[in-house]
Amino acid sequence: MDKSQKSLFETEPDPWTLDASSEQQVAEIVFADPPHGPFSYRIPATLRAPLAPGQRVQVPLGKGNRGVIGYCLHAGSKSVGSRPLKEVLAVVDPQPLLSPAMLRLAQWMAEYYLCPLGQVLHAVLPAGVRGQAGTREMTFLSVPDDVALKLDQLKLPTKQLDALRILAASPRPLTPPELAAAAKCTLGPISELRKKKLLRAQVQRIQNVEIDIAATPREENLHLNVDQQAALDVIIGALERRQHRAVLMHGVTGSGKTEVYIRAIDEVIRFGRQAIVLVPEISLTPQTKQRFSSRFGSVAVLHSHLSDAERHWHWQRIARGEVQVVIGARSAVFAPTPQLGLIVIDEEHDHSFKQGESPRYHARDVAQRRALAENVPLVLGSATPALESWQAAQRGEFLLIDMPTRVSNRPLPDVATIDLRTEFQDRRSRGAISRPLHLAMEHALREDGQVILLLNRRGFSTHIQCPSCGYVANCPHCSIALTHHREGDKIVCHYCDHQERAPAKCPDCKFDGIRYSGLGTERLEAEVKSRFANVPVLRMDSDTMQKPGSHEQALAKFRAGEIKILLGTQMIAKGLDFPNVTLVGVVNADTSLHFPDFRAAERTFQLVTQVAGRTGRGDKGGRVLVQTFSPEHFAIQAALKHDYALFANTELPVRLEHAYPPQTSLVRLIVRGDEESIVEAFAEQTAERFRQALELHQVAHRVLGPAPCPIARLRGKFRFHALISSAHGEPLRQCIAKVAASLQAPAEVQWVLDVDPLDLL
């Protein structure tokens, strides 16, 4: 929120003086960019009929009256003063793009996430919809009734009269080229008829993109076990009663949660309604698409590789009710389903459901609000639920359903740790792969199994230092060390994408023995290929998976058995189902465990548990080896036992002791700018104002900071942050909103509020 978010009366001089005798047709308009509004505009008589809430309009803004696109929130009679209001110039959309229900959801988001409503509406509508991508304007001609009645009395040239009669007899309006072809004439006679006002012309926007949807062979329903049937019965009960119910389906990896989703959606479609299924972006694989497409007649899959025109085409189909199931990542929660019946969030713990830029919404919470407003069930599924969801279930806000066994009673994989402190002392263990892990890989490959190796760090070397003078290769724009990538022989900042050639000598003292150390996926790949020279190896991380379709192609090769060892970052831990994987190795569990974030233990438990779930899904069984310097840590121990309750019951008291979510509500203030002292001063002033407001309203709270962010400088900007927490979420947000509305930041300072932050870097 910034100062432009304040009410109209706080940002500009009063534009009118109230006068009950002066009543006009007025529209309330908000904008995506500052000043956000709302502002009032007079609706001219020519626009009153088509203008409605949810439509976009073009209006003059500012002293220069530049034409700007805004969103109509309300249109109707309003008493205004003697000062004239500016007029709406045009209505952009023939029909509202936003339903009343979606406008109410956006209003809630603006209030909860402390951000401008116009910004929220801009995020709700995809860019392809806003830009009407894949469409073109076409003119359609018809004959007015009064002209048709006197058709035989008209004295016109033969070509014009023939065209007029053909159009009058046509069952539908025709475009000028269609009419010219039917009348066997040029466009000249038709232009003359239009000049004589004997034709009615209507301009319509037509989609010129048509996407072929390949038919998928129909698959039959799978047999449900007792746990699956019990979960399905609960969801169907809520569907039949047409009531909202939030269900947390806690099922171990491989317990068959997806089949429960599918069977529940079957019931939704039987009732003539639609379902939305949210999955992490990385899980939008051909395997996921095929799983749903093979069971339902009409599925729209929304993913980041769609063009704007394709996304707009899908959006229109969804809005017309032609789609039964919408599958997509975070933003699919806004799909314009006219008869919503169910929302499902798979892998609900995944951090990608939280938007990183304003509006910084969490799709899980938005889905919960939408499901409540539209009175439909919400199903959250995960083997490692977010502690926020688990806590809600313990409080009775969510219904908890346990699915503790795998499909067909397959056993969970055996998980063991490898203590890297001991292995470091073993002369036979050198490199990233310890001797026990190497021997386990040899055994798995000898038995014709496949291996997955997880290392959640990209690059070849993560630390570059001169042993002579101490120089360290850091990013010139961020307080982050540069990472060496052997491919291209470059050193890269993974935050701002700054790149340099990898130095052969120290840039400061010219010493030629500069050291490249640390471990990333690129170095791990080189080591694996050196140890297993004749085994096909594939690396999956954001460096190798940049091209559209590369992720799908890689997984297809692994599924077909062309690749025997798959290694990569956390993208390989997300919901993949490969029955022939018999070994999973976590190369270094400590990369996430010792992160400067109160969620570090939770993320480590989730990552190890999720990647462990990629093995043992077939008849061969599976094994997991976790390399760590902290084998005694409770998050590692709980993951070894596949015991979520053990982890939660240990972690939640720690969160309570330190007043961290989910035991409290948290708002993060982030301030950035070019001058460190100015940024720090504004952060301190703002945090103090928040503290004073909370004390004034007697809201129990805690303010941590401000202090430099863990990444203190990013993309050339100095950064400070403060954490404001309270057990009383709504009063906390209300107090912060009031203070934020009156903040006056220096021109060189930018600031943002992040409600329920997941990232503290």
Image: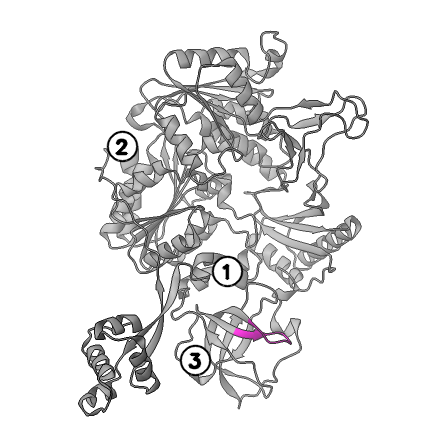
- Mark 3 belongs to which amino acid? Leu
Disc 1 crowd, CA 10 A, few/some/many (<14, 14-19, 20+): some
- First to last magenta residue range: 59-67
Quarter occupied by the C terminus: top right
Disc 2 crowd, CA 10 A, few/some/many (<14, 14-19, 20+): few
Q: Secondary structure at mark 3?
A: helix
Between 239 and 158, which is closer to the camera in this rendering? 158
Q: Percent position (x, y) of residue 89?
A: 50, 77
Q: Which residue is mark 2?
A: 226
- Mark 2 belongs to which amino acid? Val
Q: Nearer the viewer, mark 2 or mark 1?
A: 1
Q: Which residue is mark 1?
A: 122
Tag 1–tag 3 contact (CB < 8 Å):
no
Q: Quadrant of residue 221?
A: top left
Tag 2–tag 3 contact (CB < 8 Å):
no
Quote the CA–CA distance across marks 2 and 3: 60 Å
Q: Percent position (x, y) of residue 536?
A: 43, 20
Query: Which disc number belongs to residue 47?
Result: 3
Q: Is residue 662 magenta?
A: no
